[in-house]
Image: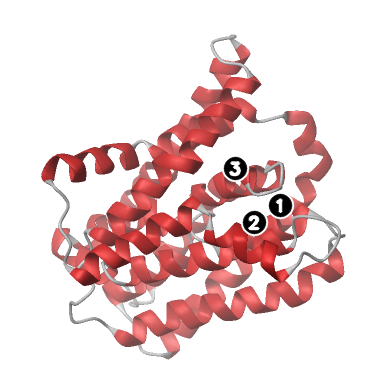
Amino acid sequence: MGEMLVFSLNGVGPILLLMLVGFVLRKTGVINKEASNRINRLAFVALIPCKLFSQVYSSDLSAVVDLKLILVCLVGTAAVLVLLCLLVPRFIGPGPARGEFIQGVFRGNAAILGFSLITNLYGEAAAAVIALPLPVMVIFYNITAPIVLALYSGGEKPKAADVIKKVASNPFLIGTVLGVVCNLTGLKLPVFVEKTVDNLGSAGSTVALVALGAMTDVESFRKSGKLAVSASVLRLAVISPLMILVGALFGIRNEQMAAIVCFFATPTAVGGYVLAKNVDGDGSLAGQILIVTTILSMVTMFLTLTALKGLGVM
């Protein structure tokens, strides 16, 4: 049990600390809100797209995969997304908050925590279990999330052409699609280019989290904190156990079950906040959901892993 607690702290602790660093830097005057907005923009247009490209580009998309695992993750996430799109507008008024709420609930942080979670539990060799589901889910997230945010970016229903333009020009989607094209065609980048892209990508989440901490406004959190808490509880206490149950009913166990945990029991994705911040929304709710899910997941991930281990599922 102690090892599980240490793992949970090692997984989500750095996220909180990086946001704290940004908050302290702003409070001490090292950076201001305008600078943090520019840093966030850098993460959006360059750093995180490079990370997405590298993840898909370096994955073995032709490997033998567990199709059942991929279908549970993909179909389950799609079903959650559809239900959210049908139900959320009944409870949240028109505006960007709708899209940010939906994205914060359905989009997981497996890209950052997935490999470390599985390798910590089952060793380096087990990392192959998530090697293909991850890019498949990354592609799904980065096609659907821009569409969701674009659809709910304003009070009026957007024109289809405007939505298509926003989605097609989204750096996250471009990075992911380029990674798929290079991977499937066998196109190999020069080593110096590959290393440069990889280095830029490795800074993406770090820079985004520091910027988020610097832009964190306690007063705005008080105003819309209830939505952030609602989204976090829905993701971690409702959808997560439900999808884990579905996986168990389909006979998914051990490393494959750990992959289910990666996609449904982790905090919402850092990239989701960066995306929301830069797609017609101020990103405040998305940032708050990231903070709350990160804090809550320190408890829920520990309880989830402990319960699954005790039940013999992992």
Is residue 165 in sight in this rendering? yes
Q: Secondary structure at mark 2?
A: helix
Q: Could you tell whether 314 is left or right of 168 in the image? A: left
Coordinates of residue 106 in the picture (x, y in percent)? 58, 66
Q: Which residue is mark 1?
A: 229
Q: Which residue is mark 3?
A: 291
Residue type at numbered disc 2: Ser
Coordinates of residue 163 in the picture (x, y in percent)? 66, 64
Query: Are the residues flagged by discs 1 and 3 in contact, CB closer than 8 Å?
Result: no
Residue type at numbered disc 3: Ile
Badge 3 or badge 2: first in the primary sequence? 2
Query: Are the residues flagged by discs 2 and 1 in contact, CB closer than 8 Å?
Result: yes
* Disc number for residue 232: 2
Q: Secondary structure at mark 1?
A: helix
Task: State how far apart marks 1 and 3 are (Cα).
Answer: 10 Å
Coordinates of residue 15 in the picture (x, y in percent)? 46, 39
User: Can you say whether 112 is above or below 211 in the image?
Assistant: below
Q: Could you tell whether 306 is left or right of 3 in the image? A: right
Tell me the crowding category of disc 3: few under 14, some 14 to 19, or many 20 or more residues within 10 angstroms, Cα based. many
Residue type at numbered disc 1: Val
Q: Residue at x 68, y 60 (%)?
A: 150
Residue 295, by quadrant, is top right
Instruction: Name the residue at the bottom extreme.
Output: 250
Q: Residue at x 53, y 27 (%)?
A: 20
Badge 1 or badge 3: first in the primary sequence? 1
Coordinates of residue 125 in the picture (x, y in percent)? 14, 64
Q: Nearer the viewer, residue 73 or 98?
A: 98
Tell me the crowding category of disc 2: few under 14, some 14 to 19, or many 20 or more residues within 10 angstroms, Cα based. many
- In this rendering, the count of numbered labels is 3
Q: Residue at x 54, y 47 (%)?
A: 294
Quadrant including the C terminus: bottom left
Task: State how far apart marks 2 and 1 are (Cα).
Answer: 5 Å
